[in-house]
Image (cartoon, rainbow, N blue to C red):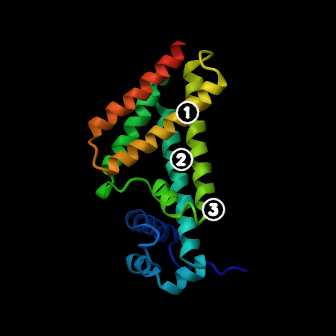
Amino acid sequence: MARPRQFDEQMVLDAAIELFWSRGFEGTSIEHISTSTGVGNGSIYAAYGNKLGLFLAVFELYCDRRAAFIEEVVETAEGSAHDAVGNFFEAVIADCASQPGRRGCLMINSIAELGQRVPEVVSISARSTGRMEMSLANRLRQAGGESLDDRDVSALSAHLVLVSQGLIQLSRLGVAPDRLREIAEVSRKTLASYAAA
């Protein structure tokens, strides 16, 4: 029977998210997390086994939060599908600008760093991306009625998520928010052309 954890697990996971996100997997050690949280190395190892075990717990939490963020943004947007997509892109761009050092997205960063070595990173990312696409697809169906068929909705929702991830990467390169909005607007126009077809 596992012993109950003698530390605030949420605090450790939140601190570890910040460190892995800013420093990457290789650049973050258990010692960094211990120093940041005041929780001893031994307690962290006992709870998660090793650095990868902790990272995967952190990564799953981060990806779940990102998917929930997108779901909330899309589901609470009022108006047409065009308005909902605009709201989605604006939320992504604002979130990018708020990140210290424009550090991008822990999910995208980790796929690049660990995707070839850690299959769990790919599977967690795929599940999270699927949730984002489903949320957008549901909103497009709700707003678009019969004007879009299921294949169009599926492809468009995947396209919108892909563009949002590209915007995040461009933000890491220092691209200004106004330029990101111009790029996002191309996808909004694509959506309008599908809906009008």
Q: Name which of mark 2 and mark 3 comes first in the sequence.
A: 2
Q: Name which of mark 2 and mark 1 comes first in the sequence.
A: 2
Q: Which residue: 60% across, 56% down? A: 122
Task: State which mark lies toward you, 2 or 1.
Answer: 1
Q: Is residue 94 left or right of residue 120?
A: left
Furthest-right residue in this view = 1
Q: Quadrant of the N terminus?
A: bottom right
Q: Which residue: 35% across, 47% down? A: 96
Real-space Cα separation, disc 1 to disc 3, in angstroms:
25 Å
- Position of 2 relative to 86 (above/below): below
Furthest-top residue in this view = 197
Q: How many labels, in total?
A: 3
Task: State which mark lies toward you, 1 or 3.
Answer: 3
> Residue 71: x and y, percent?
53, 40
The reply to whether residue 103 is in sight is yes
Q: Which residue: 29% across, 36% down? A: 179
Kind of element beneath mark 2: helix
Real-space Cα separation, disc 2 to disc 3, in angstroms:
20 Å
Furthest-front residue in this view = 116
Using the image, tell me which numbered label, if any, was put on residue 157: 1
* Type of amino acid at the residue the image marks with label 3: Pro
Kind of element beneath mark 3: helix
* Type of amino acid at the residue the image marks with label 2: Ala
Q: Quadrant of the C terminus?
A: top right
Crowding at dot 3, Cα within 10 Å, few <14 / some 14-19 / many 20+, comes out as few
Dividing the picture into quadrants, the one containing residue 132 is top right
- The residue beneath circle 3 is 119
- The residue beneath circle 2 is 67
* Type of amino acid at the residue the image marks with label 1: Ser
Kind of element beneath mark 1: helix
Residues at badges 1 and 3 in contact (C-beta under 8 Å)? no
- Position of 128 relative to 22 (above/below): above
